[in-house]
Every structure is written in structure tokens, then in C-alpha cells.
Amino acid sequence: MNAIATEPPLQAVRLGKSFGEKVVLHDASLLLEPGQVLGLLGKNGSGKSTLIKCLLGLLRTTAGEARVFGEDAWDLSAGAKARLGYVPQQVTAYPWMRVRQMIAYTAAFYTGWNHALADDLCRRWDLPLEDRTGVLSVGQLQTLGLVLALGHEPDLLVLDEPVASLDPSARREFLRTLIDIAVESDESGPQRSVLFSTHITSDLERIANRVAVLQNGRVAFDSELDTLKESVKRLRLTSHNGAIPDGFAVPGALSTHVAGSLATVTVADYQPETANELASRWDADVAVDDLNLEEIFLEMHDGLSH
Ligand SMILES: Nc1ncnc2c1ncn2[C@@H]1O[C@H](COP(=O)(O)OP(=O)(O)OP(=O)(O)O)[C@@H](O)[C@H]1O
């Protein structure tokens, strides 16, 4: 086994990035392990694209480290670049080239280009092969960017809001393909890893096995998706003694709402005994609700901002 195969596909260590006086990232750490599909969440302007570009060596970091397959991202070898597929937020292509020519042009850079796969993706995503790329819609251009990033079957796929411009059916089709790619990496040799940023939490929920939240220039949260869903819960307390007392508080709660004899508390560290403890402490019935990822993200964002 060569050294490169054992290295994490992506790693940020206390990464910082400023544009002049403006600090966008400071102390951002992230580790993508082989075979993981990591969804990166964060509000507009939180620095997702900047982190991705620093991680891939497209922007120079101001502090810390960015590594791709163990190599310094700013000085990547051709071998590491060949194992990497990237779709930027805004895909660019030579406008005078036809789609077919743009694909052939890109394919020429790779010894391992899978022509059958690229043809199949074009068919599945209805790409007009004879159109010049300059006349493609934003969604078609993004789809072309995906074909260009997938054709050489990269070990690491990095997607900056890959489906933002796609219509619902193209989005579903793309996600299905991405799931295929992730499943394939579970079954056999190549451990394909994916990092993608998105605002669409339902998409993330479908395909990611890990989620990281970028906030205030740091990775404020990073967890397996299943663990996250098991630990963030909404508890509804109904007091047996009328109004919930003024001093009602649950340590570490992300949010608390009290109305008369009802209290709703969202906690980030739910344990099976949490409900029983609250029930006896506040002499209340306690119901426990699951949250979907969007609700969790909103709760965490508010909770982490405090
Ligand atoms: N080249 C640049 N020069 C100056 N500021 C920049 C530059 N690139 C990004 N920024 C700033 O860095 C911050 C983070 O931008 P970035 O595009 O990384 O955020 P994002 O999380 O990807 O946002 P969105 O979800 O809206 O795409 C923004 O305030 C942006 O204005």
C-alpha cells in the first residue's frame, strides 16, 4: 500500500484565511476520512467556499495547514490532482466549445478518463452535447461541471453547492448518482470521499454520513449525522403543578421556551436518562421529539451564536 492511499483525503488544521483586514476563517479544523460523505453547512458568507478553496490550494491560507491526501494543498503533486474532482460554485467553460468538445478537452488531461461514464452521465442529465457551452443555462453549466469532475472517477470529490442551480428532477438525478458513487466506495477497493457544501439540508440528510457546521470562521460543529440526530432532541415538559417556575433552566440547552405550564427545550446532549431526570426535577410529563436536520441546524445556529 503506498503512503498516499493511507492519508486522509482532506485535512484543515487550525486554518486561517483573511482578505486584507477581513478575517473569514480562523482556527478552522476539519478531517475528511476515506469513504466519508461530508456535508458542509453554514450561513451565506460563513466562509464555505473560502474553506473549500483553501483546502484545495486554490487560495493561499493565512495561517494553519491545508492538506490533500497528506500533501500541502498549495503545492500539490500531479498525482494528487489526478485523484481530485472539484465543481466550483460558478462553473466556467470555454464558451466557444461545444459540450462534447469541452468534455473531450478535459478528458485529454487524464489518463484514466472513463468515456463510458461521462457519456452515461450526459445522457442521464440530458446535456445537449452539440450546444456551445456559452449558451448553456446556469443549471446546464453546473451539470457539465459535474460531468467534468466525475469523468476521471476521482477518489476525492469536492462540490461547492453542486445542486444550487438544478431543477428538482435534475437535483434528484444528481443526488442518486452521488449516492451510487458513495455506495460504490463502501463495497470495494476505492474509498471515494466526498465533501460538499449546501444550504439544502434535506439533500444533505439523504446523502451525507457526516455534517460540519461553519460559523464565525471555525468549524463550530462536526459529527456523524446519526450521532447528531440522536443527541439533539426537543423535549416538551408539561408541569403537574401549573405554571413552570421562573427559574426554569436546563444546563446547556440550545433553546428554551416557556408558556404557562408548558416548556419546550432543545438539548444538544440528549441521553436516555435526560427525560426522566427532567420529569422528576420539575414534576412534569416529558415528551421527546426528533428533529430533522434543518430544525437541528437552525437550533444549533441560534444556540452556538449565544
Ligand atoms: N476574494 C475575496 N476578497 C475579499 N473578500 C472575500 C473574497 N472571497 C470571499 N470573500 C468574503 O469572505 C466571506 C466568505 O465568503 P464565502 O464565499 O467563502 O462564503 P460562503 O459560506 O461560501 O457563502 P455562500 O453560502 O453565500 O456561497 C464573505 O464575506 C466574502 O465577501
Image (cartoon, rainbow, N blue to C red):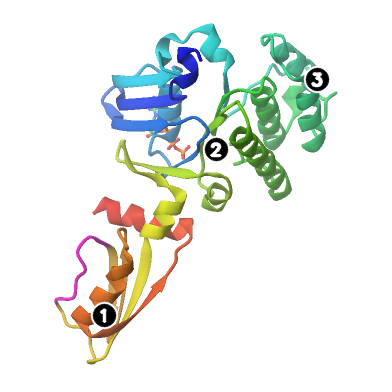
* Label 1 C-beta lies within 8 Å of the nearest ligand 1 atom: no
Residue 77, horizontal then vertical, whole percent: 49, 7
> What is the spatial separation of the Cα atoms under label 2 and label 1, in whole angstroms?
43 Å
On the image, numbered disc 2 is attached to which residue? Answer: 161
Secondary structure category for the residue under label 1 = helix
> In this rendering, would 81 be left or right of 53?
right
At label 1, counting other C-alpha atoms closer than 10 Å, the crowd grade (few under 14, some 14-19, many 20 or more) is: some
Foreground mark, 1 or 3, reads: 1
Query: Which amino acid is tagged 3?
Result: Arg
Q: Which numbered disc flags the more N-terminal residue, 2 or 1?
A: 2
Residue 215, horizontal then vertical, whole percent: 33, 42
Q: Which numbered disc flags the more N-terminal residue, 1 or 3?
A: 3
Q: Residue at left 41%, top 52%?
A: 227
Which region of the structure is painted magenta? 247-253
Outermost residue toward the right? 130
Do tag 2 and tag 3 residues touch (Cβ < 8 Å)? no
Numbered circles on residues, count: 3
Residue 272 is a magenta residue: no
Outermost residue toward the bottom? 241
Q: Which numbered disc flags the more N-terminal residue, 2 or 3?
A: 3
Query: Which amino acid is tagged 2?
Result: Glu
> What is the spatial separation of the Cα atoms under label 1 and label 3, in whole angstroms?
65 Å
Secondary structure, magenta segment, majority class:
loop
On the image, numbered disc 1 is attached to which residue? Answer: 279
Do tag 1 and tag 3 residues touch (Cβ < 8 Å)? no
Residue 6, horizontal then vertical, whole percent: 46, 21
In which quadrant of this rendering is ligand 1 seen? Answer: top left
On the image, numbered disc 3 is attached to which residue? Answer: 100
Foreground mark, 2 or 1, reads: 1
Determine whether 22 is above or below 270 in the image: above
Residue 81, horizontal then vertical, whole percent: 54, 14
Residue 250 is a magenta residue: yes
